[in-house]
Image (spheres, grey):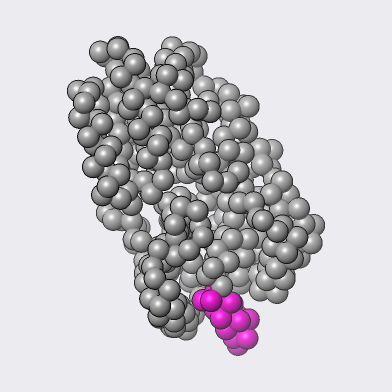
């Protein structure tokens, strides 16, 4: 099959990494991976995946506006719309996979609706698949939101894939009108990145601190650095991973904090982060989809601080904490953080959580069955 895979990340890198993990699983097929956010530097793809970049558009941390002035946005939108339609006509896909839309990414309907209308009226239209993570972001007007989503999904889509284990999180918890979705809805299980075939030895005193893309999470890094001053154990080591989209101002401020303690090391963004977790005694991070799956796969002790702007990370963190897989940081007061670090390091290992985590492979199976 020729698969056209559309992915737009607007703040972090989670959507990109999850989508790329799925694209990589289509190793018997040809994938044209269209990405619309800032390109992740240093990321290599397998031979069957071809990356096609649209002029990037990113959003502010509150998801209220594009981080480009309005006149430039309109120009970029026209270029992107034409480029996306050109890619569609050139690749002639058998399958069109769209990540999140229409359940999210409403601001990108300017290019997605023309694409979907073009496909719908084509002589040989591609099968259209929606790729959804486990939890949707809450909306100010859920009735209007769900009505619009249903109008689009029932008009254009042939299949909805939810990358979750329904024993942990079901779609109806964040989208009430699931019963009105006409295309088949399939739970694939969670999409997890593969770790090392031979896990390295774990170093109990090694703490990894990460914030994904780095556009948010500055307060978490600052709190942990200040908490570390309150833990006098000379054997502990704190490795702080720079996010690829961290602002220069945040980087200067945070690196100045880490230089005050010789036990702290500032590290560049790591594409082998899942392997790094297998070596660590503790992970401290946000509670994004990919990071949580990396935590489960590695079995590392973990403290997570959910992104406070919406319920998505908090709900995921609470579900996994209830199963004993990790602990939730509820305060960024340095004294509280220091206490939780000490308790977690000295406490028992996390429980093994029986969740379905072969989501990439099940996505391939579901789409092959559809076609």
The answer to if 229 sits in the magenta stretch is no
Give the number of callouts.
0
Residue 293 in the figure: left or right of residue 124: left
Residue drawn at 50 percent across, 41 percent down: 307
Give how far across and how far down residue 188 sits, in percent: 61, 49
Task: Name the quadrant of the C terminus.
Answer: bottom right
Q: Which corner quadrant of the image does residue 117 belong to?
A: bottom right
Residue drawn at 48 percent across, 63 percent down: 65
The answer to which of 148 and 23 lies nearer the viewer is 148
Give how far across and how far down residue 234 sits, in percent: 25, 13
**Picture layout, residue 342 above or below residue 292:** above
The answer to which of 224 and 234 lies nearer the viewer is 224
Residue drawn at 26 percent across, 49 percent down: 248
Give how far across and how far down residue 160 sits, in percent: 65, 60
Whether residue 10 is visible to the viewer of this picture, yes or no, is: yes
Whether residue 203 is visible to the viewer of this picture, yes or no, is: no
Q: Which residues are magenta?
A: 110-125
Give how far across and how far down residue 16 sits, in percent: 44, 56
Residue drawn at 53 percent across, 76 percent down: 110
**Picture layout, residue 106 above or below residue 305:** below
Q: Main secondary structure of the magenta part?
A: helix
The answer to which of 133 and 275 lies nearer the viewer is 133
Q: Which corner quadrant of the image does residue 221 belong to?
A: top left
The answer to if 124 sits in the magenta stretch is yes
Residue 350 in the figure: left or right of residue 121: left
The answer to which of 143 and 39 lies nearer the viewer is 143
Residue 113 in the figure: left or right of residue 82: right
């Amino acid at each position: 099959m020729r698969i056209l895979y559309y992915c737009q990340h607007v703040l972090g890198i989670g959507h990109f990494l999850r989508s790329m993990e799925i694209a990589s699983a289509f190793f018997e097929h040809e994938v044209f991976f269209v990405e619309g956010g800032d390109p992740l530097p240093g990321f290599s793809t397998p031979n069957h995946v071809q990356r096609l970049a649209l002029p990037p558009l990113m959003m502010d941390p509150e998801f209220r506006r594009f981080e480009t002035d309005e006149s430039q946005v309109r120009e970029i939108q026209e270029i992107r719309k034409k480029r996306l339609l050109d890619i569609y006509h050139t690749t002639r896909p058998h399958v069109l996979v769209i990540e999140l839309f229409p359940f999210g990414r409403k601001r990108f309907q300017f290019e997605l609706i023309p694409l979907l209308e073009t496909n719908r009226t084509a002589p040989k239209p591609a099968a259209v698949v929606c790729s959804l993570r486990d939890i949707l972001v809450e909306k100010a007007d859920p009735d209007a939101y769900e009505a619009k989503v249903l109008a689009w999904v029932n008009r254009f889509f042939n299949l909805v894939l939810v990358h979750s284990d329904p024993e942990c999180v079901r779609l109806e918890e964040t989208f009430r009108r699931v019963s009105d979705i006409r295309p088949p809805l399939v739970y694939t299980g969670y999409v997890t990145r593969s770790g090392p075939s031979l896990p390295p030895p774990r170093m109990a005193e090694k703490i990894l601190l990460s914030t994904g893309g780095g556009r948010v999470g500055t307060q978490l890094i600052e709190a942990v650095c200040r908490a570390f001053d309150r833990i006098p154990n000379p054997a502990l080591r704190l490795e702080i991973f720079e996010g690829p989209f961290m602002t220069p101002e945040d980087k200067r401020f945070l690196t100045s904090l880490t230089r005050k303690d010789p036990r702290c090391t500032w590290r560049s963004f790591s594409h082998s982060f899942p392997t790094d977790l297998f070596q660590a005694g503790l992970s401290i991070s946000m509670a994004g989809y990919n990071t949580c799956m990396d935590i489960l796969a590695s079995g590392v002790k973990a403290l997570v601080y959910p992104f406070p702007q919406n319920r998505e990370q908090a709900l995921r963190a609470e579900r996994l904490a209830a199963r004993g897989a990790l602990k939730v940081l509820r305060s960024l007061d340095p004294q509280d953080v220091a206490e939780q670090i000490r308790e977690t390091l000295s406490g028992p290992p996390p429980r093994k959580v029986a969740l379905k985590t072969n989501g990439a492979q099940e996505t391939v199976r579901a789409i092959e069955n559809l076609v």
